[in-house]
Amino acid sequence: MLKNLIFFVFILSFLSAGCSTAVKINGITQVSTIDALLVGVYDGHMDLKELRNYGDFGIGTFEGLDGEMILLNGKFYKVRADGKIYRPRLYEKTPFACVTKFTPDYSEAISGPVNFKALEEKINSVVPYQNRFCAFILHGDFNRVQTRSVSAQKKPYPALKEVIKNQPVFELLNVRGSLIGFRSPDFIKGLNVPGYHIHFVTDDFLAGGHVLEFEATKGTLKIDTVHDWISIYLPADNQCFNEADLKTDRAEELDSVEK
C-alpha cells in the first residue's frame, strides 16, 4: 500500500513538473486566403463562435463581405458600410479572418505625431526580423483616422477590386481608440497580406474600419511577436473556392485594395 502511494505521488510530481515547463503555443489561425477573397470567394465557412476558440484578437470580414471585422479582447465588432459598429451574432460566419491569442512581449508609451510610416518604422525596429509575424495594438488619442468599409455583396460576387471602387471612406477626427493589426512576412504572399494590415475601433465602439491613414498624438504600443502559424482552414465543398484562379500573382491588385 505504501509503495503504491509513493508511486502515485511520484507520478503527480512528474506531471506537475511537465505542465510547468510546457511551452504555451502562441500562433496564428487563419480562415481561407487573401487571394481567394480578392477573386470574390465571400461565402462564410467558419462561424464566429468557433473562430473565437483560436484567439481573442484579430481582423477579417464577414459572409458576403458584410463589413470589416475586429476581434478585440475576445469580442467581435462589425463595421458596416454605414460606418457604424455592430455586435455580430456568434452564428455569423467569416470567409476570411486572421486571429491569435494576444500576449504582448513589448510595450512602450508613444508620443506623436505618429503616422502609418512612423508606426511601421517603430515596429520594424522592435522586431527587425522580417520573417517574423507580429500582432500589435496602438491604443491612444488620434487627431485623424481615415477608414473604409465595404457594402455587403450578393451573388454572383464581384472581385474585391470592383467592390472597393464604391467603398465608403470615413474621416474620424479627434478620437480615442485602438489600431489593431498584423505585420506579416513577404513569404505569405497569396495567403495573407504581406506587410501591414490594420483595422481601427474607437473606445466608444461607435466607429472604425480598415485603416487607410492615421495620425496619433499619444498612446501605448503593445507588440506580440508570433512564432507559429497553426492552421489555415480552407472552405470545404465550396465550388467558388474550388474553381477560383489562385495561380495568378495578385500583389499589385492587393496593394491597391489595401491602400
Image (cartoon, rainbow, N blue to C red):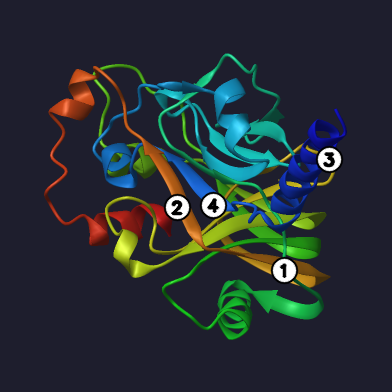
Q: Which of marks 3 and 2 is nearer the N terminus?
A: 3
The amino acid type, in three-letter code, at marker 2 is: Trp
Task: Return the disc, 2 or 1, that comes first in the chain's sequence.
Answer: 1
Under tag 1, what secondary structure? loop
The residue singled out by tag 1 in the image is: 105
In the image, 32: left or right of 218?
A: left
- Name the amino acid type tagged 1: Asp
Q: Which mark is residue 90?
A: none
Residue drawn at point x = 35 percent, y = 43 percent: 165
Q: Position of residue 30 (x, y in %)?
A: 44, 41
User: Which residue type does callout 3 highlight?
Assistant: Ile
Mark 4 or 3, closer to the camera: 3
The alpha-carbon separation of the residues under discs 2 and 4 comes to 5 Å
**Residue 27, which numbered label?**
4
Where does label 2 land, which residue? 229
Viewer can see residue 79: no
